[in-house]
Image (cartoon, rainbow, N blue to C red):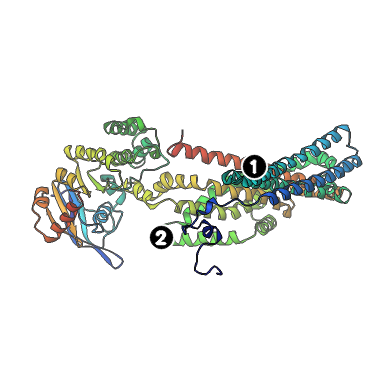
């Protein structure tokens, strides 16, 4: 059984349909990359999985449990599903360490010493232990995004959702963030990421999904999607990406 | 346009080549008239100042506080005022330099000199304006045989009644200190109620909005009057044993809770929704998100407007005299009617002003410290 199962979901913003029967599954330890033109619903899909947006039809299952519709404990769901945003969204009034330990302390009710030890171990891994007492505004964009990833990891999630996490970064800061994602993938973290970094997607993904017109238009292993796409729309999209020099 | 075809006027025509002349290279405007005016204004002000100082000397003699020392002080002030001649004279000199330079064909030197002349003239006008305001105030004080001074600033009465007034002022301090703490809590409750989410929160939102509307519209003086006189009349147990000060605190908390609730609400709504998204995505509940993420950030933003409301509250403690509480204002009014003189009320006025100033500075300091800590580029 797939770890994350999205079945035939429909969603509309007012009159504008975003999903028209989208289905997608993510196996454990898989890294799935969502690609597609802007406005195709990559971010919205991630936000739906996390319960930040609601869907109108269909269902999303994690480990076989239905995670959409009435009666779902969204707070419990979010403990197991981490999300990292394009704009980092660190809490500016808290130090790096406080950012990382907030949820373990308040949601998991961990002991402060335990939470801080775990947070420091994670920060050490990404080379930011020396910034633990700094406020986010003192950090570069790349450092902030690395902290945001660690903040999500501190909850020990089963799945990580990464929403265009390098789009707001200066080009020279992208690699430090991507290398963390690469490490996570190597450790077997299940991840679903929306990205414009096609080179990275090709390298790290087990599966690429091309979103178009409210559905997964084409999916397959990276070699196939990038090397020999079957669908006309996918080819047109990739052609524009290549023309922009991004692949 | 009389020049017809849009050709630039005389200067370009004079250059003859047909190309447009660079406008900034034109000769400077004459500055002598400005400088002369400045000098005249300076003389006028000095004459007025001397006349006023003469009046002050007479007033001091009448009050029997005049002495050699006050005379020396007045003479020093009179000489000090003459400093106004310095920039005016320098302005005139610069204007003359400019004219000479222009006559010799040094356009740039002429421009520099006449610009300096105009600056110095305006400098003179600025100081003259401030000095004139001050002189008008002094004239007001000594006018009509010191009538104004005697009415508002009768020093012996201020000195003799000061401790009595200060003692009563502690009532104001007590009322606003307690009320401010309560307002801080109550205002947050109101704001959170006004933002209560979902269909279940709707009745709460409505009642909180109603409260805010009523108590923001209700004049504080009427609120104090109604609670201070009304509640004891109801004979309700517990409530009617409260002191007058407690009724004042209740009334002011209700009034200012409505204001501060709005301030809190604006602060909470100013925090970008992405902060809520980030907190909720970590599994924090609605309440936890408010408590740990949204409210702490909102409070930092609203400290300056909060101080405004607190200063308003402090001043409104003077309204408690309508229910007969002996606060500083009421005490001063008693003294004023006993002595047919308002100087004790001036003491109260000064006390109210004096307590707000350190608060304003404290808030500046707090905001600055917080920004230095959290913003990039600080130490």
Residue B259 spot, x, y in % from top left:
56, 55
Residue named by callout 1:
B357
Please, what secondary structure does the residue beneath circle 2 have? Answer: loop
In the picture provided, is A79 more to the left or to the right than B2? left
Label 1 CA crowd tier, 10 Å (few <14, some 14–19, many 20+): few
The residue closer to the viewer here, B334 or A70, is B334
Residue named by callout 2:
B200
Q: Is residue A125 visible?
A: yes
- For marks 1 and 2, the one nearer the N-term is 2
Please, what secondary structure does the residue beneath circle 1 have? Answer: helix
Quarter of the image with the N terminus of chain B in it = bottom right
Mark 1 in CB contact with mark 2 (< 8 angstroms): no
Q: Say which residue appears at 19% left-offset and 57% top-offset.
A: A211
Residue B365 lies in quadrant: top right
| CA separation in Å, label 1 and label 2 | 45 Å
Residue B152 spot, x, y in % from top left:
81, 48
Q: Say which residue appears at 36% left-offset and 39% top-offset.
A: A99
Q: Chain of mark 1?
A: B
């Amino acid at each position: 059984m797939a770890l994350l199962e999205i079945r035939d979901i429909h969603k509309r913003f007012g009159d504008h349909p975003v999903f028209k029967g989208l289905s997608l599954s993510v196996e454990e330890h898989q890294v799935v990359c969502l690609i597609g033109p802007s406005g195709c619903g990559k971010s919205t899909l991630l936000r739906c999985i996390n319960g930040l947006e609601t869907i109108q039809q269909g269902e999303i299952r994690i480990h076989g449990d239905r995670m959409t519709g009435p009666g779902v404990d969204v707070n419990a769901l979010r403990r197991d599903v981490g999300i990292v945003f394009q704009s980092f969204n660190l809490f500016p009034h808290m130090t790096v360490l406080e950012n990382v330990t907030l949820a373990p302390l308040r949601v998991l009710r961990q002991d402060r010493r335990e939470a801080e030890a775990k947070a420091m171990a994670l920060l050490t891994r990404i080379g930011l232990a020396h910034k633990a007492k700094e406020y986010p505004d003192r950090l570069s964009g790349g450092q902030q995004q690395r902290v945001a990833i660690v903040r999500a990891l501190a909850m020990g999630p089963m799945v990580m959702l990464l929403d265009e996490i390098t789009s707001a970064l200066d080009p020279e800061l992208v690699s430090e963030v991507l290398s963390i994602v690469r490490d996570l993938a190597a450790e077997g973290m299940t991840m679903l990421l929306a990205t414009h970094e096609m080179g990275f997607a090709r390298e790290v993904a087990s599966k690429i999904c091309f979103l178009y017109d409210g559905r997964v238009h084409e999916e397959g292993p990276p070699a196939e999607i990038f090397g020999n796409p079957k669908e006309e729309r996918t080819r047109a999209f990739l052609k524009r990406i290549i023309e922009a020099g991004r692949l | 346009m009389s020049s017809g075809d849009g050709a630039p006027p005389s200067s370009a025509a004079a250059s003859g080549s047909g190309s447009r002349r660079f406008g900034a290279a034109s000769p400077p405007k004459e500055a002598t008239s400005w400088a002369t005016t400045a000098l005249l204004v300076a003389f006028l002000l000095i004459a007025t100042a001397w006349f006023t100082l003469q009046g002050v000397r007479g007033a001091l003699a009448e009050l029997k506080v005049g002495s050699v020392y006050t005379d020396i002080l007045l003479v020093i002030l009179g000489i000090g005022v003459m400093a106004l001649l310095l920039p005016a004279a320098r302005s005139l000199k610069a204007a003359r330099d400019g004219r000479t330079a222009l006559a010799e064909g040094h356009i740039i030197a002429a421009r520099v000199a006449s610009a300096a002349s105009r600056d110095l003239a305006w400098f003179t006008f600025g100081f003259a304006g401030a000095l004139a305001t001050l002189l008008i105030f002094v004239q007001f004080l000594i006018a009509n045989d010191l009538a104004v001074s005697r009415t508002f600033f009768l020093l012996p009465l201020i000195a003799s009644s000061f401790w009595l007034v200060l003692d009563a002022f502690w009532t104001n301090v007590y009322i606003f200190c307690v009320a401010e703490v309560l307002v801080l809590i109550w205002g947050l409750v109101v704001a959170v109620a006004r933002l209560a989410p979902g269909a279940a929160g709707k009745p709460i939102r409505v009642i909180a909005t109603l409260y805010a509307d009523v108590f923001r519209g209700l004049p504080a003086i009427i609120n104090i009057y109604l609670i201070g006189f009304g509640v004891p009349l109801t004979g309700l147990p517990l409530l009617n044993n409260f002191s007058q000060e407690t009724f004042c605190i209740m009334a002011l908390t209700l009034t200012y809770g409505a204001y501060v609730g709005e301030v809190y609400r604006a602060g909470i709504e100013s925090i970008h929704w992405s902060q809520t998204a980030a907190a909720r995505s970590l599994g924090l509940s609605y309440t936890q998100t408010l408590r740990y993420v949204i409210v702490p950030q909102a409070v930092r933003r609203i400290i300056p407007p909060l101080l405004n409301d607190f200063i308003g509250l402090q001043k409104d403690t003077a309204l408690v005299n309508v229910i007969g509480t002996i606060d500083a204002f009421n005490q001063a009014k008693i003294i004023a009617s006993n002595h047919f003189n308002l100087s004790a009320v001036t003491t109260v006025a000064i006390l109210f002003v004096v307590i707000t100033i350190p608060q304003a500075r404290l808030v500046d300091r707090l905001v600055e410290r917080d920004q230095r800590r959290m913003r990039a580029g600080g130490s």
